[in-house]
Structure formats: C-alpha cells, structure tokens
Amino acid sequence: MSSGTLRPPFRKSVKVRQACDCCRARKVRCDGASPCANCTSATFECTYLAVHKKTGPKGRRRVSTQPRYAVRPAVPVINLPPELPAASRPDSEPDSVASASPEPEQLLEDQAGHRYAQLGPHTAGTPVDARLLGGHHGICTNLRDPFGFQPSPLVSTELVALCLDAFFTHKYPITPILDRRQMEAALPHLAALPELYALLTACCAVMVLSPEILESSSPSSPSPSPSSPSAASISTSTSTSTSTSPAPPALPSAEFLISETTRARRFCNYIESPSLTTVQTSFFLFSAFFCLGRDNSAWFYIREAITMLQLLRLHEEDTYASIAPDQAAFSRRLFWVLFITERAYALQRHRLLTLQRTLALPAVDPAGPEAHILSGFLDLISLFQHFDNDFLALWNLPLATPPPAGTPPPEPLTRLQSVLARRGPPPGHCAESQQADLVVSRQWLKTMVWQLCVSKTPLPSSSRSRSRTADDSMTLHYPVTIAREVVAAARDLPRGALEANGVGIVEKVFDIGCSLADVLALAPRAAPPEALAVGPRDCLVEIVRIVGNTVRGGGESRHLRVLVAKASECLRVGVDRGVAVRPCVK
C-alpha cells in the first residue's frame, strides 16, 4: 500500500448476542436492533423468536426444509379467528423457526424429488372437534413466516375455479364431500391456506384427467400435457377464433398438480393434527393415482384417508354430537364414500377391508336442495353394504381344485345374487351420473359374484339344467344377461353421464366385457341357443365401444387393448379398434 492511501480507522465490531430470525435464515450480519437495519430496508417483520442453543457439537447436522431465498417482499399477516385451536395458530407452528424445531424424525422424499422433514408438535390430546374443525379446516402453516408457503404461478385462480365448477357440475353427485361455498370462498386466500391449497390441487389433478368434463364447462379448454410436471409441458396454445370470450386457463398435468399437493402438505402438520380436509385430500390423491393406473399409490392413499378418518374418530357415531352440523354432514358423507370406494377397490385388486358399518346413513331432507343427490347416494351404499369381510375372505382365497359336478353354489352367494337382482330405482330418481354409476355398479357386482360362483362350483349352461326354481344368475351364460343390461342402459343415458364417472366406470364395464368374452369363447358348449340368438356377440362389440368412448384417449387405454384382444379371440374375427374411437366433434 502506498503512503498516499488512507487507511480506514479501525472499528471494533460490536458482538451481537442473537441475530433476528430473518437475518439468521438469510445468513447475513444482524445489528441486533429491533427492528434491525436489514429487516427495515427489506420491509421484513423483525422477530427474535428463535431459542438460542448452546454451542458445540450437536450430532448429525439437520437438513434444512427451507431454501435460501433472495430478498422478497414480506408476506402480509392474515388475522385468523380467535377460536382456532392452539396447534393451528400462527404463533404455535414450529416450522416458523428452524432452530426452535425438534430434530426431524424421518426424512421423506416426495414425487418431485425434494427431501423434507416431517415436523410438528404432539397433539394427541387435542379434542376431536378442535382437530376436525381447526378454523379453516385446520390451518397448520405459520402465516407470519416471510419465507413460508407460496402457490405455484401455474395454479391460477381461474384454473382452480374451472376445475371446481366441473367437479360440482359432474362429479359432486357421485362424491358429495365438498362444501362449494367454502371452497370458492378460499380461492383468494390460497397463499395463506396451504392445507386447502393441497385439497384443491388434488381435486384439480382428478379433473384434468377427465378433460371431456372440463371441455363441457369450457369448450375451448386446452388438453393437459401427458406427464411432464414442468412449466414447459403446459400447453399455452390459444384458439385462433375471434370470439371475445376469455381464453381458458392452461391445464397443468396431473402429475404436476399431485406434486403441488405434496409440496403444500409439507407446510402442514397433517399427520399429528389431521382434519377433515386431510381426509378429503388423501381421497382425491387416491382418485388421481387410480386414474393414472398407479395401483400401489392409489391403495396407499385410500388407506391413508381411512386412517386419518379413524384418527379423527369420524367412524364413531358419538363424535358427531360434538361438531357443527354442516361439518358433521360432510364428514358422514365422506365416511360412506370411503366405505364404497374401499369395497370396490378391494374387489378389483383383492385387498382387505378396514371400514365397517359403524355409522348411521346420511339423513335426507325430502324438501332439501340435495334430496335427489342423497337419494341416489343411499342407493349406491345399499349395493355395497352387502359385501363384507366374509365375502372378501372368500373372494381373496387362492384358486383351488374345482369341486365335483353337481355341487351347489354356496348359499350366501345365491342370496347375494337375489339381492342384486332386485329392481333398482326408476330413471329420474337421481342425477344422470348417479344413474349410470348405479346401473353399471349393480351389474358389475353381479359379475363379481358370478365369477366367485364359477370358481367354487361348476355352473350349468342354463337354468333348466338345474331346476325349475333356479334363475339365470347361477348359470354359466349369466354374463350375457348382464352385458345386455349394461348396453341397454348406456343407450338410454347421455354420454356425459358415463364420462362423469371416468376410469372407475370404464374398469367395471371392462370386467363385464371380459366375463362375456370368456363365456362366448365357450359358446358351442356353454351358452344356450336362445341366448346366442339375441346377439351376445353384438353386446360384446358394444361393450368394446363403451370402453373406448367413455374417457379421452380411450382408443389407447390399457383396458381397451386387452378387451379388443379378448373379443377378437373369442369371436374368431378381428375387432377393429375403430369402433371405439370417439367421433370428431367440430
């Protein structure tokens, strides 16, 4: 250094005993003032909430759950109702200060590839009603944290509103578990409500997998990208039409929306402090993975939903006396939706049951606005309530040596077929989407019982081969009768009624078609002449058409490929996939 260069005077730095929370998170020098200079210049809220820990080795270094952010404007503080439980209030959330949080018990990796710690205080002693309601469905995020949750810019309010409108128009009659007014009221506040954001993105993931439903709400809505969760995969093409109507929002992929759900859940202590929203979110995640054909993930989330419901004791009637009437109504409906869904999925995938009939059925007000929806909902419950642990235990048994000819079918199966053979509600009794679900589910359950009968006893080719009192349900050609009922119902119902049920109804029709194809493969020996004379082969071709036309991309679905192969084999002719291609509508 030259002699002409001035040396700055030496200043002894003042030792700051504790940096403020923001400076500590940003790892910048803090002057210890309140507020400090850094927070003042960056318009952050300056707090000293972190508990100062002693120095020295502390074992393995914990993995931070927060990225190192650049300077951002402070998130506005939202005033919450004073009745929020302690576990849900902002000043009780441990994630706000990393140094004050307990060491993570387990590191998890979500589908987006990020690792995070599952944190949260022990709240086992929290009253059931407080854990269930939790203000806005149990808010768990610290809203005062300037580095807290932020919604993705790809999940716009317009997108969520579009998906919600489509859900309540088409799928709500089948799964009446969401309060529309509450969901729509939460839209402007998603940044402050990560738990509701997780629920809505999970619901959107289900809806973007049914683009034909979204198109009915927004005809020019673009299609979602196949699988990529990145912004580059979002279709931003717009119509060249000169219409003055606003362009519909771009649809992210279902996988991206699922990753948003899991990301938002990191900001919620939803395992130790579950809420009704937690159960609803897990159910929609099950639905999304089921539509994607990811069976292990689907089974995981349906079981997670049931576990959370049981943690809240929503499977016990006494719980409902201590919660608000509207919350009790949606909780009761959710229990029965899970009751039906678990049984259907257990039959499809040979699983075990968890939920039993421990709750009263939802009450129906004949003069209420949802009387027709709840009536159809009760009819669907009545179909599945006969399939209990005894039936599933028999269903899940491994195939054994067939019994000798002449062995009668088990009496419980005969009674069950008689129950399913009862006439269902007349058309117009419920919503069209419910009517489609009821008709197909009834015929599908008949097929499941028939398949079990075939595995347990040799069935005759016709009822006359058994006795005068026997009906077709205990004969080998019964799938012909079942398929005829499905084809007739599909012709009477609008296509949108089947589309609203999505992949769930496609898989049931697929099972019916496979059983019909198996019977027709044995036609020379098994099917009676009068059954063949009424066109069971035409029924099979029509079943193929239904499977191919119900959901978008049906011509490439895994169900259609298998069914076309079976139909071609049993009919001894090539079945053109063209019969299942949706006609182009302009």
Image (cartoon, grey):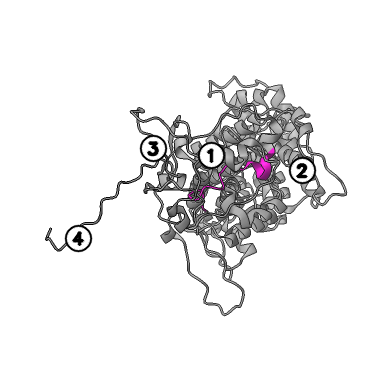
Q: Residue 6 — which label?
A: 4
Q: Which residue is mark 3?
A: 63
Q: Does dot 2 land on a helix, a strand or a loop?
A: helix
Crowd band around label 3 with a 10 angstrom C-alpha radius: few (<14), some (14–19), many (20+): few
Q: Are marks 3 and 1 in contact (CB under 8 Å)?
A: no
Q: Is 518 displayed left or right of 28 in the figure? A: right
Crowd band around label 4 with a 10 angstrom C-alpha radius: few (<14), some (14–19), many (20+): few
As drawn, 264 above or below 235: above
The picture places residue 558, in percent across and down from the top left corner, at 49, 47
Looking at marks 1 and 2 on the same chain, the residue that comes earlier in the sequence is marked by 1
Q: Along the line of sight, which residue is nearer the eye, 93 or 584?
A: 93
Q: Of the residues tagged 3 and 1, which is closer to the observer? A: 3
Q: Of the residues tagged 4 and 2, which is closer to the observer? A: 4
Q: Does dot 1 land on a helix, a strand or a loop?
A: helix
Q: Does dot 4 land on a helix, a strand or a loop?
A: loop
Q: Which residue is mark 2?
A: 326
The picture places residue 549, in percent across and down from the top left corner, at 58, 56
Q: Of the residues tagged 1 and 2, which is closer to the observer? A: 2
Q: Is residue 266 magenta?
A: no
**SS assignment for the magenta stretch, majority:** loop
> How far apart, in angstroms, are the residues tagged by discs 1 and 2?
28 Å
The kind of residue on which mark 2 rests is Asp
